[in-house]
Image (cartoon, rainbow, N blue to C red):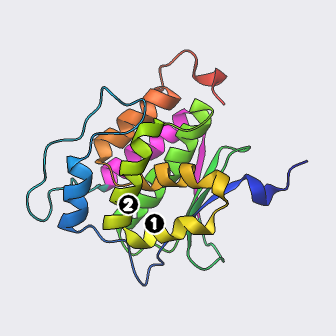
Amino acid sequence: MVPIRSQLKPHLGQTSAAPITSSAGIAAAFMKATLIASLAAITLPGPASAAGALPLAGWQDIDALRRLLVASGSNVVQRDCNQRGLQGLYHQPSRTIVVCRVHADRDAVWNTLAHEATHRMQACANGNITRSEHHEAMARALATYEPLEWRSLKAYPAREQLGELEARYTAHLPPAQVLQLFRRYCGSPTSPSLSQRP
């Protein structure tokens, strides 16, 4: 039996005292990039302009992603988490996503939910969701525009770092693309094979 601790995919990040930022530089980097993975058909919009160019997630986006997760057989719960810096986690055997009650704003809630939903996508895909030729560009964008998130990858064992890179990168994509990716990897509520997914 594998200990539960090794089955958790925690999202360690900045605490509510220092929420994740959405600067114009981040928007420009993530809007210019071509989407990763076997996502060849999906591309990000062209270069972003000034502040606010990255579509911010609204509560309706958070609700839409939560509904997709639940429809795919996942549990989404909110809890008080006692581990410093822990914002959320995905427990694969129970398909449970926990969003910790530490978020200062809606954008931080979205970031955590999209991050953990990426781990669910990885479970549905039975592995990584990106192509290896995109990993370097993803890492460079994260290191440049989200250096704290980039450095936090080192807290994970080497075998988990690629999955964490994918989750951190995907969490910065526009909400519509995260929803589209989720449907691609985990099916839609009307998908006949949904119950057969991991």
Q: Residues within 10 Å of mark 1 (few under 14, many from 20)?
A: many
Q: Residue at x 42, y 29 (%)?
A: 38
Identify the residue under disc 1.
150
Q: Residue at x 43, y 84 (%)?
A: 17
Location of residue 116 in the rendering, given as x and y in whole percent from the top left corner: 53, 52
Identify the residue under disc 2.
142
How far apart in space, not on screen, are marks 2 and 1 (Cα)?
A: 6 Å
Q: Can you say which quadrant of the picture contains the C terminus?
A: top right
Q: Which comes sooner in the sequence, label 2 or label 1? A: 2
Determine if residue 170 is in view.
no
Q: Quarter-wise, where is residue 79 in the image?
A: bottom right
Observer-nearest residue: 198 or 68? 198
Type of amino acid at the residue the image marks with label 2: Leu
With 165 as the anchor, is 25 left or right in this view?
left
Residue 99 counted in the magenta span: no
The residue range painted magenta reads: 59-78
Contact (Cβ within 8 Å) of mark 2 with mark 1: yes
Q: Residue at x 64, y 49 (%)?
A: 96
Type of amino acid at the residue the image marks with label 1: Trp
Location of residue 78 in the rendering, given as x and y in whole percent from the top left corner: 56, 62
Q: Quarter-wise, where is residue 155 in the image?
A: bottom right
**Circle 2 SS class:** helix
Observer-nearest residue: 138 or 94? 138
Determine if residue 113 is in view.
yes
Location of residue 172 in the rendering, given as x and y in whole percent from the top left corner: 34, 55
Q: Is residue 194 above or below residue 157?
A: above
